[in-house]
Image (tube, rainbow, N blue to C red):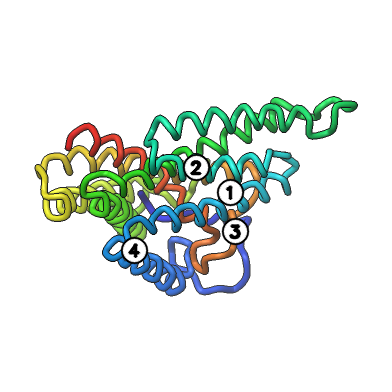
Amino acid sequence: MSEKASDPENKTGPEKKSRAGRDLPAAIAVGGTLGVSIILILLFAPMLWYVLVAVAFAIATWEVTKRLQTAGHNVAFWPLLIGGQAIIWVSWPYGPTGVLVAFVATVLVSMVWKLLAQGISNAPENYLKDLALTVFVLAWLPLLASFGVHLVTQEDGAARVATLMVVVVCSDVGGYAAGVLFGKHPMAPAISPKKSWEGLVGSLLVGTIGAVCCITFLIGSHWWIGLILGPVLVVCATLGDLVESQVKRDLGIKDMGTLLPGHGGIMDRLDSLLPSAFVVWAVLTALL
């Protein structure tokens, strides 16, 4: 995962920024605080991971739906919020089967919700578009998040969650450093101008090293699993960044929110973690 992008047309104030477009001191302070909080939870109360994720995604759902509604897209907020929480929490006792049932149930509720949003006497407006966006947000946020939160219930669950977080951070740091120092060849300039191929190489290198170390020392398994996990996770994390960048371009915004100084909103910190959560769950479930 390479460095975060900021579009020239979306400048916001005179804050001091690095070459990658961040308020770097604020970003480091916020990132460090979040990292320490997660470490403490995993060490002393691993099941509080569910509470942290549920709260984070309630906020992220509000951020995304608010941005969509501002742009004229009337997604089904309450089904997204309540159904999203159900998708996350049912993974605790019921695993992926419970997640699938909650997801499908929420889609069905959203279909009826949007159908009757204007009352039975008025025809729905933009039904297909708004319903499609509702299902997209549901799959993008709580569905992918459910795989990351479910990790903590598995054997060595805290170590698996730590692996997810450490490898994503390694990918981010490697991509940021390589992109700032050596980035000359844009990866996808039409989507995220600041991302470079050099940054991707840095992400792959540092992320894979992080994955090998986590698999070897945190989980205590075969080091070669890290050689599989690292590159796959880095590619998915980078694509997750690009997906959110394109969503923000479509909406004409820089960040999904302003809650986290130097980072934007909660959703702006979750973009790469979401696909990465599924990758870690899938790879470790299959190989451990």
Marker disc for residue 142: 2
Question: Amino acid type of disc 4?
Answer: Ile
Task: Work out whether residue 182 can be spotted.
Answer: no
Q: Which is more foreground, mark 3 or mark 1?
A: 1
Q: Are marks 4 and 1 in contact (CB under 8 Å)?
A: no
Which residue sits at x=22%, y=45%? 155
Which residue sits at x=53%, y=45%? 85
C-alpha gap between disc 2 and disc 3: 18 Å
Marker disc for residue 257: 3
Marker disc for residue 61: 1
Q: Which is more foreground, mark 3 or mark 4?
A: 4
Question: Amino acid type of disc 3?
Answer: Gly
Which residue sits at x=24%, y=35%? 285
Tag 2 or tag 1, which sits nearer the N-term?
Answer: 1
Q: Secondary structure at mark 2?
A: helix
Graded by Cα atoms within 10 Å as few (under 14), some (14 to 19) or many (20 or more), the crowding at tag 4 reads: some
Q: Residue furthest front?
A: 93
Instruction: Place residue 258 in its image quadrant.
Output: bottom right
Q: Are marks 1 and 2 in contact (CB under 8 Å)?
A: yes
C-alpha gap between disc 3 and disc 4: 25 Å
Q: Are marks 2 and 3 in contact (CB under 8 Å)?
A: no
Q: Residue furthest right?
A: 121
Q: Which is more foreground, mark 4 or mark 1?
A: 4
Q: Position of residue 262 (x, y in %)?
A: 49, 67
Marker disc for residue 41: 4
Residue closer to the observer: 72 or 136: 136
Question: Amino acid type of disc 2?
Answer: Pro
Tag 1 or tag 3, which sits nearer the N-term?
Answer: 1
Q: Which is more foreground, mark 4 or mark 2?
A: 4
